[in-house]
Image (cartoon, helix red, strand yellow):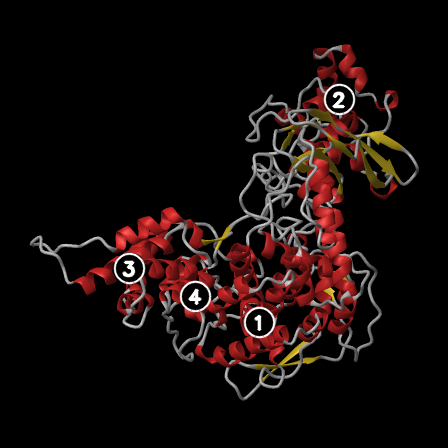
Amino acid sequence: MRSLRLLALLLGLLTCIWHSKKACVATEPELGRPVSMINDVVPILTKTGCNAGTCHAKAGNGQNGFQLSLLGFEPLEDYQHLVLEGRGRRLSKAAPEQSLLLLKATGQVPHGGGVRLNPESEHYRLLVDWIGQGALYDGDKATKLKSLELQPAQASLAPNAQQTLSVIAHYDDGSHKNVTSLALFESNDTAMATVDEHGHVKIMDIPGSVSIMVRYQGQVSVFRAFVPQSYSVDKLPDARNYVDQLVFENLKRLGIPPSELTDDTTFLRRVSLDVAGRLPTEQELASFLSNHSPGKRDEAIERLLASGEYADFFANKWTAMLKNRRDDASDITSNFAFYSWVRDSLLANKPYDQMVRELLAATGTVLSNPPVAWYKRVKDPKTQLEDVAQLFLGVRMQCAQCHHHPFERWSQDDYYSLAAFFSQVGRKPTSTRGEDMIFHKRGNAGVPNAKTGQMRKPAPLGQDPLSIEPDQDPRLKLADWMADPKNPFFAKAVVNRYWKHFFRRGLIEPEDDIRDSNPASNPELLAALEKHFIESGFDLKELVRTMVRSSTYQLSSVPNPQNLADLQNYSRYYPRRLSAEVLLDAIDDVAMTRTDFPNLPPGTRAIALPDNSYNNASAFLKVFGRPENESVCECERIQTSSLAQSLHLMNANDLKNKLANGNGRCETLAKSDKSPEQKVEDIYQAAFSRKPTADELAVAVGYLSEIRKDAAGNPIDPGKNLRDNLQDLLWAIINSKEFLFNH
């Protein structure tokens, strides 16, 4: 060891001779301030990307045998990897500039990550000084970062404008410093704004609001930019509730005029699809159009909320996210029982917090207490906490199992403290194959941190551990915390999820990724919805009612020249494709047919299917993206179009059979005494909830009167000719965008 130290000393002397005097003097520890491993070195490694997940913080062993913690959240481990591993060859305290760490980072020796440091930069000099000062680890002695301050925190900027951000770090000893050069910047919408590594923001020409996330040493702050148009909004629809007040106030500030209110027929089709998952019936349409009461839209909403289809539609949504999945024939009992419990709860308008409590704290058997079925699919406490956090709190905790969440404040301790709420869930086999009885095991709740081995007691996110007696079920304490009006996640998560259901885009997007670094596009509106939902007693029907009664929901989907580029401020209704189940039912409605599903009563609608097993029996549901209920994320449902979908609508036998059904609409109209004009109107009203325009009517009637000829050139039978033409007309309508989209 003594010879190694002498060799290092000799190397240092030779380095001083080779380099400039200035460089050698800079490494003298007495001439510079002490460099902090925590507050100086780790931020540099983060800024240069050395401890990114794609580089030396890669899962496993990092890169090429050199491992760092992700984004520097474990500085002690980083210190050990830097100083003690590799026989100490990564750092040369006697000759800092000859340290392998610096030689690779500056590209003086081959490095797979390329050049990460400029030898003339301040960051390089700090690393040189730290190594020259002995590469010390200050650990608990270092001042602690308390908060980040952005200057400015928000601004109103014109299209194509630029803004430079400054980042100020505030420490627990009252000191502060500018850390802009070490901070990481990221835009939440690069189509609206970009930002470089120096904090220079470039605004694009899309109006709205955009956020720049700034991250430094585990702290996150957000700069919010408002990008208004140079357009004065003077005329607004009448505000029907607080939703409209807050949406229109935002649009006025941004200079984005909303579209006009939509017409009655479009509204009825839209709200029927969104609330009940089906097209309005011809009788409903006729009754609605003949009603001249100013409150007829509200009356239609109430009828839909009271209908069984509302419960079917939203039970389909919730059971998919709650993983009601059939993997074995023995699952059928729990699948049906669980689906029925969710549907009945929604139909009875059971308070949302009560539903969640019954689910989380479920005990007994599936037959006696159907919510127990959730524990059949979600068995591991870690999976339970991850699903509960993402689904009911809008918080994605998966990253925190292995390391500190990169964009949030959640650590591994937070992860295992939340898992501890499920640590006392017991199971006993029952006489029913594949079914367990769920019960609370008496004992002290806790889960060991997989990394540190320290036992973590149950603790809500961001709070201290709870005191729970051995005979108390920790899950009830979790449910209490979730339903607390002061809970910052529970109500917010569900109102944001429902907002996305009705408006295509969540106020926070993605809808289940609620964090400080992912702010809402209209935070005032989200807060108002959250407050109203809590005050209503967690009333889901009231939440739906509030949203669809608003003028904002009832705006036309047709853009005006000033709101054409707006995709986040709800200046118009954003059209979206019908989901697989809704589209299949809609085709059945216009064709006057019904799809048969195995072991279910004839006439069962696709939105009322209890689990995923029916996807295998329906090629249509598979092609159009009905989920397999494997994830709590709604992203499992495919809503984008595909070539397979287009080919299915054009050529699939099941669609041809529906159009040619002997009791279907085409056959019924072919045999009826109605005029060609009336037949076309019937089809249009069934599919679009409106009558055809004059041009559409003329084209359709003309097509129905066309005479088909056989291979020999002879006219075919008139009855068959009309049936074929009706089938072609209905086929064309089913393939139209107006039918495939809710608008």
Q: Residue at x 41, y 53 (%)?
A: 692
Residue 720: percent from left, percent from top: 19, 63
Residue 293 vs 510, above or below: the answer is below
- Gap between marks 1 and 2 measured at Cα: 63 Å
In the shown orientation, is residue 173 left or right of residue 447? right
Crowding near the residue tagged with mark 2, few <14, some 14–19, many ≥20 C-alpha atoms within 10 Å: few
Residue found at the far left of this picture: 712
Crowding near the residue tagged with mark 3, few <14, some 14–19, many ≥20 C-alpha atoms within 10 Å: many
Which disc is residue 122 wearing? 2
Locate the N terminus and report the quarter of the image it occupies.
top right
What kind of residue is marked 1?
Answer: Ala
Q: Which residue position is annotated with label 4?
A: 585
Instruction: Choose between 174 and 132: the one closer to the eye.
Output: 174
Q: Which residue position is annotated with label 3?
A: 726
Under circle 3, the secondary element is helix
What kind of residue is marked 2?
Answer: Glu
* Residue 320 in view in this figure: no
